[in-house]
Image (cartoon, rainbow, N blue to C red):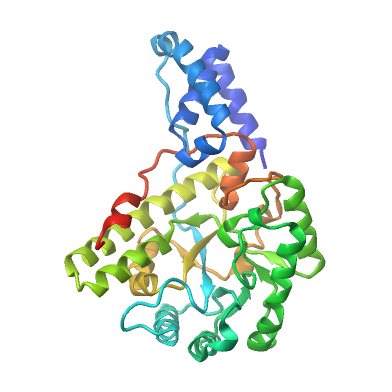
Amino acid sequence: MFAHAAVARAAHLRQCGKFLLLAFAYIETVRNSRENRCMRHRWVCMIFSGLLAAVSAPAAQTSPSAPPQLPPLRRHPVVALTFDDLPAGGGLHPGYTRTGIATQLTSELRAAHLRGVYGFMNGDGVADDPDMQQALRVWLAAGMNIGNHTWSHPALSSETAAQFEHNIAFNEPLLRQYAGKRDWHWFRFPYLEEGATLQQRNDVRAWLHAHGYRIAEVTLNFNDDDWDDPYGRCLAKDDTASIAWLRQSYMENAAEFIRLGRETEQLAFGHEIPAVLLLHETSFTTLMLPSLLHLLRQEGFRFASLPKVEHNPAYSLNPNIGLPNGDSFPDAFLDAHKSGYPSFRPEPVQRLNSICQ
C-alpha cells in the first residue's frame, strides 16, 4: 500500500537534493494540518514549530513550500451510505416522531433506488419505547439493514476492552429479534474510537473477529449531526432565516469535507478507494438528504452497498495504531505515519453553537 508513498518520497529527495527542503515542506504540512491532530500530538507540533523558525528563512530563499501534489479526483467515485444511532439519532424536535423520521428517511432512500443501506443500532431504551420499536420496523420493512453500534454508545477510550465487548454483546438479542435473517454482523465504533492504545484496539478487534463481525469503516464524514441541535432550537423559535443558513452551511460543509476525505484517501492509499459515508439518523439530515444525494450525483458518485464497498482490498489493511480520539479509516493511516492533511475550510462550530440561543 505504501509503495506509492515511498516512490513519491524518493522522487522528492532526488528533486530537492537537500534534506532541509524536505524538512521544511513536512513542517509546513504539519503546521497546516487539522487542529485536533496538533493538539493530539502537541509535542510533535512544539518540536517542528521550533525547527520551522530555524529553517524557514533560508528554505524560503531556495524554494517555496507547496501543498501535497495530488492527482485529479476520480470521475466516477463509489460510495456506500451508512447511518448511525438508529432508532433515535439526535433530539426529538417539535413535530417529529422517531417513526416519522424513519418513514421520511427510508422514503427518500427508496426514491433514490437505494436498498440495503446499513443503519447502526443502539438498543438502549428500545424495549420501553413503542415509537422507537416502530421506527426500527419501518426501517427494515423498507428493505434496509441494521448493524451493531453497541447497546449504549460508550466511548471505547472510557471503557476496558472487556466492558466494551460486553456492551456489544448485550445489543445482539435485539439485533436478532429485528433483523431476522439479515446479516447484522457489521460493527460501527461509537465516535469512530477503535482503541486508545494498540493493545486495546487489538483486543477488541480480536473479539469482533471471533464473533463473526466485520468493522464498518468510514472514509467520508462531515459531522452532519452537529447541525441537528441547532435545527431543533431554530425550529422551536420558528426562525426561518436561521434554518435557511443551517441548510446552506450544511451543504457547504458536506462538499468541503467530502473533497477532503477523497484527497485524504489518496494520501493514505496512493489512490481513491470506494468510500463509506457516515451520516446520522437525525431529523435535519433526513430533511437534507435529497440535497445531499444531488450533491453526490453532481460529484459523479455511484452508489453501492456497504459489503460491496468494503470488499475492496484496502479495507483489509490495518494502520496498527492506538488513537485516543476517533478518526476515519484513511485518517488513521496518516496519523500512523505522521503525515499531513490537505488544506480545508473548518466547520462553522462557533455559529452552530450560538445560533438560535
User: Residue 159: x percent and y percent?
Assistant: 68, 58
Q: List the single residue furthest toward the left.
A: 241
Instruction: Check the image and report above or below for 75 versus 99.
Output: above
- Residue 128, image quadrant: bottom right
Relative placement, left or right, of 317 versus 234 is right
Q: Residue at x 64, y 70 (%)?
A: 150
Q: Residue at x 31, y 68 (%)?
A: 231
- Residue 19, image quadrant: top right
The answer to whether residue 15 shows anywhere in this view is yes
User: Residue 129: x percent and y percent?
Assistant: 52, 88
Q: Residue at x 58, y 30 (%)?
A: 8
Instruction: Check the image and report above or below for 207 versus 329.
Output: below
User: Residue 198: x percent and y percent?
Assistant: 73, 46
Indicate the quadrant containing the C terminus: top left, top right, bottom left or bottom right. Answer: bottom left
- Residue 60, image quadrant: top left
Instruction: Check the image and report above or below for 18 versus 8.
Output: above
Between residues 131 and 297, which one lies in front from this camera angle? Answer: 131
